[in-house]
């Protein structure tokens, strides 16, 4: 079995490793204790990508895990509050090549009763060498060094400072005037400070895009992810080869209707290898 990257004890811990740190709960099988991290704070709770990464971390460090991540689906039932939480990660079925998981995050309410904030499922798998081909080539865009990194404005949500983002096209509207006519974004990205890529970081990076409705409408309407699924196509060796390099991310909305839209994402490394894809459904308000 493999595990997520851990910095050496002689160097400062990366904020991502601090945010996804989990300790086994005493006297409770399949449970881990965690703590929200201020460095990944969004408007009303943690950045959704760090929540997904934390759930995946529970699977990765579980002693019964088989193989590496194949898919992760996270359903955001409610926002996490600042403070401690519990992750439940249960392998419900193990086959020869795949293992199926149910996960949840619980947090105490004002009366101290545990309340589910997040539910999830995951599949891990033992990958074997087979015939393989890619049908989604990386777009031909200038390399990351030819694009300027964005600087989060004063007062922006804190999690933006945890990523280096270099937009290629369609980042956010220049004017919030309702004149939007597409939802496509292409963006070079990586952790800040740079961190060797692993499955946990990849899960979080799949969710760094602003809501597609903002770009399509050129209006900053309230929006939030309801459910996201990340499909992992890369092996651990391919992630290791990617190292601290940039990923090219591409996101596009497909249908905006009756208060919800869906969004597809592809993530390639600089060598052109498709590492992950994702699909999410997002709530928006007029």
Image (spheres, grey):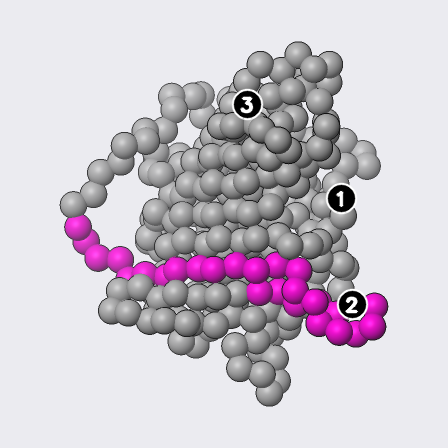
The residue segment tinted magenta is 104-130
The circle drawn on residue 103 is none
126 magenta-colored: yes
User: Could you say which is closer to the camera, residue 221 or residue 270?
Assistant: 221
From the top left corner, tell me how far across and down residue 118 is, in percent.
Answer: 61, 59
129 magenta-colored: yes
Residue of label 2: 109
Residue of label 1: 43
For the C terminus, the image quarter is top right
Mark 1 or mark 2, which is nearer the start of the sequence? 1
Q: Residue at x 43, y 72 (%)?
A: 91
Q: Residue at x 32, y 29 (%)?
A: 137
Query: 10 Å neighbourhood of mark 1: few (<14), some, or many (≥20)?
Result: few
Above or below 154: residue 232: below
For the N terminus, the image quarter is bottom left
Above or below 100: residue 158: above
Secondary structure mainly formed by the magenta segment:
strand
User: Could you say which is closer to the camera, residue 222 or residue 35?
Assistant: 222
Q: Residue at x 40, y 43 (%)?
A: 276
From the top left corner, tell me how far across and down residue 209 is, in percent.
Answer: 58, 35
Above or below 162: residue 10: below
Residue of label 3: 183
> How far is disc 3 from disc 2 in space, using C-alphas?
38 Å
- The answer to whether marks 3 and 1 mark residues whose Cβ atoms lie closer than 8 Å is no
């Amino acid at each position: 079995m493999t595990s997520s990257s851990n910095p050496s004890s002689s160097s400062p811990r990366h904020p991502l490793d601090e945010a996804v740190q989990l300790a086994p709960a005493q006297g409770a099988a399949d449970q881990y204790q965690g703590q929200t991290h201020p460095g990944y704070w969004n408007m009303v709770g943690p950045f959704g990508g760090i929540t997904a990464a934390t759930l995946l971390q529970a699977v990765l460090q579980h002693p019964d895990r088989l193989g590496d991540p194949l898919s992760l689906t996270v359903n955001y039932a409610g926002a996490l509050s600042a403070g401690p939480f519990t992750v439940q990660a249960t392998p419900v079925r193990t086959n020869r090549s795949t293992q199926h998981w149910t996960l949840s995050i619980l947090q105490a309410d004002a009366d101290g009763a545990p309340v589910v904030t997040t539910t999830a499922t995951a599949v891990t798998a033992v990958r074997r060498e087979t015939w393989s081909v890619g049908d989604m080539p990386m777009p031909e865009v200038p390399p990351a060094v030819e694009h300027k990194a964005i600087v989060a404005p004063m007062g922006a949500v804190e999690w933006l400072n945890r990523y280096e983002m270099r937009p290629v096209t369609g980042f956010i509207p220049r004017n919030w005037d309702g004149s939007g006519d597409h939802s496509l974004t292409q963006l070079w990205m990586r952790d800040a400070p740079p961190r060797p890529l692993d499955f946990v970081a990849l899960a979080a990076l799949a969710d760094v895009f602003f809501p597609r409705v903002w770009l399509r409408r050129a209006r900053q309407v309230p929006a939030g992810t309801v459910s996201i699924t990340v499909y992992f196509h890369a092996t651990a060796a391919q992630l290791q080869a990617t190292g601290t390099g940039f990923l090219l991310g591409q996101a596009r909305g497909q249908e905006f209707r009756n208060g919800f839209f869906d969004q597809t994402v592809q993530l390639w490394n600089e060598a052109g290898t498709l590492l992950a894809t994702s699909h999410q459904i997002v709530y928006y308000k007029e």
